[in-house]
Image (spheres, rainbow, N blue to C red):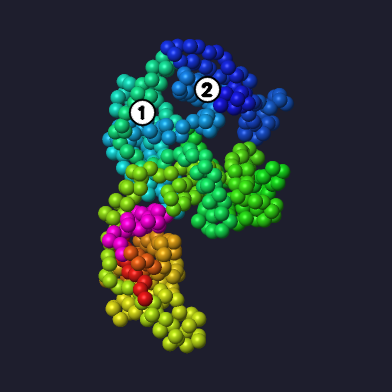
Amino acid sequence: MIEKLQTIGLSLARKKSINGFTLSFYFSKEPEDIDIWWVDLYKDYFSSDNKPKNKAYFGVFLISNSTLSYAISMGKSHFYLKDFCDTDFGINLAERIADDNNLKLKNSKLFGGKRSKTIISYQENSEIEYDSGESIHYVKAKTINKDKWGEIASFGNSTQLHLKILPDNLPELVQAIEEELRKNPRIILPRATSVVDSTKIVELDQKLAQEILNSTNAGLQPAEATVSGVDFIFLGKNQYSFILGRQRQDIEELSLSALHNFINRYNINLVANINNIRVKVSDENNKGYAKPLKFFFDFVDDEKHFLLDGKWHVFNQNYIEFLMKQIDEKITFENPNTNFSNSAFEKWQNSLSGQESGVYCYPEYYFNSLRENEGYVNLDRHLTTIRQYKIEKLDLFKDSTAFFVKIGTTQKFAYAIDQAVATVKILQNLNTSIQINNQDVKPKKICLWFIFERQTPITKIAEIKSFIFLMKLAEWQRQCSNSGFEPVVRIGYRTN
């Protein structure tokens, strides 16, 4: 870390020893000049030909002994310190000294849907609350002891305390923090922790590379709101470039197809180079930065690992337990003993004419056709109209319930969930009904009807072991509840 501080222009200004701690102050004596964007605009009004420049001084104050090291950042230094710090520190401390009845601001990531990072501010005396599938990354709240910790504190990758304290007294504060961290947490926040096992990281990198090459489960996207220290960095419209050594390709937007093109163009072994490819981000003034490719990926595997700011994390047990609890409590579970017979399906397929067998021979169509005898309106392959929108969204409709049917494994059910979420969003945004057979209908319930290819029956939804499936289901439940629909999951099984 000291080498890094020196390479970015910081030098040791002074060092002290107090009560077994070493206090070291690093300062940028000669920071680089920074262009002022409006100077060119008003250049005719400057009397001198020399363009004025800004200087931004920054520094780091280290408090260390033989077992620990704390850093206080000033100016832009937190961008560099982040790579060397325990990124769980801030939330660990929040679980011990934040007042859970006085939340001010929360930044979190919702997994399983299109909505990603959210920033929410709260009124006075608000409790800390969270949704299923939500991982807390930043909180600002009152503390449990304003004399000891200050009235309000911010907790993210780092911690910001509002205290009047002299630098020479900081070792006492560090000791108080260390003592607090040894205590059991007062509140448990659903969140992610860093993966530190190097062997596991290599394994996850290889899994990510294969996922990029073979599927669309990995989503490449610019991080619009990231947390750096306790500051938010919002990114506007940018230009991007893929870089590997001397190989470079400019692109208009980050996408998997653009990455595939870059890999194929230069015949790159992605498994070997997943950590060597960088992405340069530039604004309209060609100012920007470069980050590793992994920094821009939104990816979750089925063992609860995921990428956050390019680093591997894993969800804590509280996140998992809360996710399952919310799913079982907030989604109605039904098992009407309506199964799918493979033998009957094959017999039906054989009875179809040549033209029919090419269009209507898939399992869902057969299953939905049988439901017509039970009073369901079969909408499979029909376009439903929602105002000016014509979309193929419903499979069945009955008793004010819209049904989305899918037969297969949990990996295949994602399409039906996304289909249902899209319909819910349109109904919510347009505040209107669905037109079926020239009649307006407004569902009260949204039902996902899954026919499982499995032998072991389930008694509740949380028994399904696919973590990605459960996260998507949690996102769907949120959308339904927020839009005033009752979420229902109905199951059946594929039998011989």
- Mainly helix, strand or loop, the magenta region? helix
Question: In the image, residue 88 lies at what x, y percent?
Answer: 43, 35
Type of amino acid under label 2: Val
Q: Is residue 464 magenta?
A: yes
Question: In the image, residue 373 lies at what x, y percent?
Answer: 30, 81
Relative depth, front residue between 244 and 373:
244
Chain part drawn in magenta: 457-486
Image point (41%, 68%), residue name: 408
Image point (55%, 13%), residue name: 14
Image point (52%, 47%), residue name: 203
Question: In the image, residue 282 lies at what x, y percent?
Answer: 62, 42
Total labels: the figure holds 2
Residue at numbered disc 2: 60
State left or right for residue 441 relative to residue 10: left
- Quarter occupied by the C terminus: bottom left
State left or right for residue 21 relative to residue 480: right
- Quarter occupied by the N terminus: top right
Give the Cα distance between marks 1 and 2: 23 Å
